[in-house]
Image (cartoon, rainbow, N blue to C red):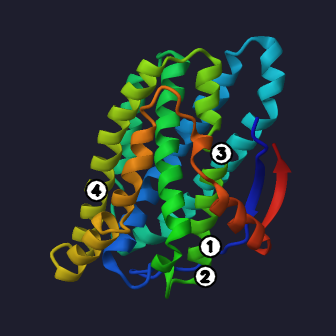
Amino acid sequence: MTTLTVRRLLIDLEQPVARHWCANDAFLTAWFNALSMSFPVGEQFFLDSVRNGAKTLPPEQQATWQAEVQGFVGQEATHRRIHALFNAQVEKHGLVNTWGPRIEERMKVLADADPRHHLAITAANEHFTALFAEWMLSHTAVFNDTEPRLKNLWLWHSAEESEHKCTAFDLYQALGGSHTWRVKWMRRVTVFFLTDALRQTALNLHRDGTLWRWSTWRSAGRHLLGREGLLSTSFKPWRAYFKPDFHPNQQSSDLSVNWLSSNADQYTRVGAG
């Protein structure tokens, strides 16, 4: 079982956020804004999936899982709340969130599905967020010249995503979820996640008036597809998910542990799972 602590980040999101808040880079700002736009709805789905999935465990197992489930739910609920505040600030720049509503529409189709399908979808998304978290924690230079409060927001979120990356996966396995459906949902989530992320990023850049600038495309190429780009460096660990014996713990979380330890003054502990 994974011990999860719920933390309250010490951050003021009542203050305005600059238009190009991420290192004055239009692409990076649009990309992170796009990801944030998916979080309030997406993370509600994740915490509901884990909470409801745990309720279907045999009674004798529910007590064993209770602390980890509470920790996961608490962390995701905190992420959802903070990113809702962040989104309210960036949307003042004229951005329109179309990703969140698309997620809500897709969720309606799954309303009566086996809870294991919800968990498989959650586990796939959590693998993506853990890979992205690892990239951010190992490429903190992308936040150079970024307000400390916003840099801390993204690195704190990354650290906790890496910390709880096993919960949905392990619960899916505990409920007898099959390898076949686990990888089927990863293929589907991959298509939806990347398509939606890029679509929302392009819309953000269009609304910002920077979509067709050469500097925007140069930044996108370098940060996504360059030698140290997010997608380039994430491909191999993403592909590992399809192995029958894969487990999230096979991929290191040391950067998460180190960040949380080194930045304990940036948050308060409000509970432990």
Label 2 is placed on what type of residue?
Pro
Q: Position of residue 100 (x, y in %)?
A: 40, 47
Local SS, label 4: helix
Spatial separation of the CA atoms under disc 4 and disc 2:
26 Å
- Give the number of the disc on residue 152: 1
Secondary structure of residue under mark 1: helix
Disc 4 to disc 1, C-alpha distance: 24 Å
Looking at the rendered image, the disc whose residue lies closer to the viewer, 4 or 3, is: 3
Question: Residue sitting at 39 percent across and 80 percent down?
Answer: 19
- Give yes or no for contact between labels 4 and 2 (Cβ–Cβ under 8 Å): no
Q: CA distance from mark 4 to mark 3?
A: 25 Å
First in residue order: circle 4 vs circle 1 = 1
Residue, disc 4:
198
Q: Is mark 2 in CB contact (under 8 Å) with mark 3?
A: no
Asked if 196 appears above or below 11 in the picture, the reply is above
Q: Residues within 10 Å of mark 2 (few under 14, many from 20)?
A: few
